[in-house]
Amino acid sequence: MFAHLRALSLFFPLTMAFFHSGRAVNRRPPGLFSDIEYAQVQSISLRMDGYVQPGDQPVPAVILVHGGGWVAGDRSREVQPLFKPLEDAGFAWFSISYRLATDMTQFGVAIDDVSGAIRYVRSHAAEFNVDPDRIALVGESAGGQLAAMAALRGGPGISVKAVVALYTPTDLGKLLRNSQYIPAQIRDSVKGTPWEAFVLAALTKLSPIDNVRRDMPPFLFIHGTADPLVPLSQSTEMCDKMRSVGASCEVFKVPGAGHGIRWWESSPQYSTAYKQKIVEWLRAELTAGTEARSPRVAS
């Protein structure tokens, strides 16, 4: 009897150590997966697709946030040109859906959805073979604004190491006044009304350029020089503001390009360089040590 008890006393700690070591976690098989729920908000199921890298060592991860003017867009289409370059570079990726702004009261709520996706990937890092301390956000167009604001808000369990913002609206008040990018239903509902000043103040809170701080993660801005919807100045002025507070950023210009990587992909002169830049920059930032970075900007 005592011999059996002694054997059990040895076996139990070993069993617990096995479970706590992470080896008991159900790892997803390498390759593509789709339609995984990462959060549920007000009975809305928020879903993601992604790619799990093979191998035993945890890899860096990229969360992709599609554009669509905050009122449209699709996680499987808008950012699809980035899937293979990220896979080939050894990154895991997660392309997310989020709540669309069906009316003015919903504008900005999707920032919380991006934060929820970060929290989900971090808490399921072992399942996806991901290093939870090497997560980046990549957002295009309206998705860039959502990604930028999620990174700027930060908080426990939702910090990221880097952000890539493609042709991103960073000053929403300026766009509301001067650009056709803001959806007509949002613009027309407030323009010339007593609510306009209130809305502009609210947009300031949602504008990355008005929320920069020294300890924010480094940003790579990618922008076409001929963008008719979101002017290049939205990226350059944001980077200037970041540099003024000591944060790190870079602006990569795509000469002659308009708005949207789906449009860029139709022309060989645009379709290669920006993807190479994203991969090279992410590889450097996600493998960088803790040494201080100096602010930078590229022409």
Image: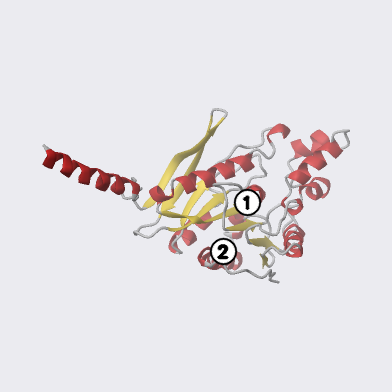
The residue indicated by pointer 2 is: 278
Q: Position of residue 146 (x, y in %)?
A: 64, 47
Q: How is the image coloured?
A: secondary structure
Mark 1 surroundings within 10 Å by alpha-carbon count, few (fewer than 14), some (14 through 19), many (20 or more) = many
Mark 2 surroundings within 10 Å by alpha-carbon count, few (fewer than 14), some (14 through 19), many (20 or more) = many
At x 62% / y 49%, what residue is drawn? Answer: 154
Res 193 quadrant in image:
top right
Q: Nearer the viewer, residue 221 or 121?
A: 121
- Who comes first in sequence, dot 1 or dot 2? 1
At x 66% / y 58%, what residue is drawn? Answer: 215
**Residue that lies at the very extreme toward the front in this rendered image:** 2
The residue indicated by pointer 1 is: 151
Is residue 76 among the parts visible in the rendering? no
Picture layout, residue 189 above or below residue 289: above
Res 5 quadrant in image:
top left
Q: Nearer the viewer, residue 149 or 81?
A: 149
- In whole angstroms, how far apart are the C-alphas of marks 1 and 2? 18 Å
Q: Position of residue 26 (x, y in %)?
A: 33, 45
Secondary structure beneath disc 1? helix
Q: Position of residue 39 (x, y in %)?
A: 51, 37
